[in-house]
Image (cartoon, helix red, strand yellow):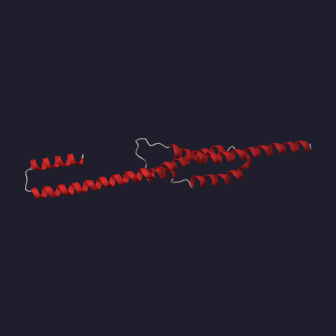
């Protein structure tokens, strides 16, 4: 009778040990999946996402990974207390990775912002010059104004 109890205890202990191993692997896989998602994320139209878009994309991915984690962790019934602790640790590890997607695209975003700034500066200077030229020509006919506007469009195109 004592050997039967000892055998059950060893079996339970082995199952508990197996669940602990599965939990460690699960925690690692969830964080690894996020890192791989960031590394492999591709934009649809070659326009990198801005900071707000990256935050929204990351949040959606976090929710997806948390749901996957909870789905798999619910089957680990022998180590529920450890699952609770590891859940908090895993979510904290994911939370520490907030902003990784934006950091991946930050240089591209900054370059596009600088390019847009230069283009706006060019457009403003061109319009200021054109306003000055047109003001010097006043009074002028409507046809002349139309011609000047067409020339300006060609310069900006």
- Residue at the location (71% across, 52% down)? 82
Q: Position of residue 17 (x, y in %)?
A: 76, 46
Q: Nearer the viewer, residue 103 or 3?
A: 103
Total numbered circles: 0
**Relative to 145, 109 lies left or right:** right
In this view, which residue lies farthest toward the right? 1
Q: Quadrant of residue 47?
A: top left
- Residue at the location (39% across, 52% down)? 111
**Relative to 23, 62 lies left or right:** left
- Residue at the location (43% across, 41% down)? 44
Q: Quadrant of the N terminus?
A: top right
Q: Quadrant of the C terminus?
A: top left
Q: Position of residue 113 (x, y in %)?
A: 37, 53
Q: Nearer the viewer, residue 9 or 57?
A: 57
Whether residue 31 is visible here, answered yes or no, is yes
Q: Quadrant of residue 68?
A: top right
Q: Position of residue 63 (x, y in %)?
A: 55, 48
Q: Position of residue 46 (x, y in %)?
A: 41, 43
**Relative to 91, 55 lies left or right:** left
């Amino acid at each position: 009778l004592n050997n039967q109890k000892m055998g059950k205890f060893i079996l339970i202990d082995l199952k508990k040990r197996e669940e602990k191993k599965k939990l460690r692997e699960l925690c690692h896989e969830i964080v690894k999946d996020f890192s791989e998602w960031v590394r492999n994320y591709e934009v649809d139209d070659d326009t990198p996402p801005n900071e707000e878009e990256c935050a929204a994309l990351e949040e959606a991915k976090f929710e997806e990974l948390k749901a996957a984690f909870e789905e798999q962790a619910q089957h680990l019934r022998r180590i529920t207390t450890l699952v609770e602790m590891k859940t908090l640790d895993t979510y904290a590890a994911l939370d520490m990775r907030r902003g990784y997607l934006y950091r991946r695209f930050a240089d591209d975003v900054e370059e596009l912002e600088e390019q847009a700034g230069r283009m706006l500066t060019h457009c403003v200077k061109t319009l200021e010059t054109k306003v000055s030229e047109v003001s010097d020509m006043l009074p002028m006919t409507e046809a002349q104004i139309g011609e000047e506007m067409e020339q300006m469009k060609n310069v900006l195109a």
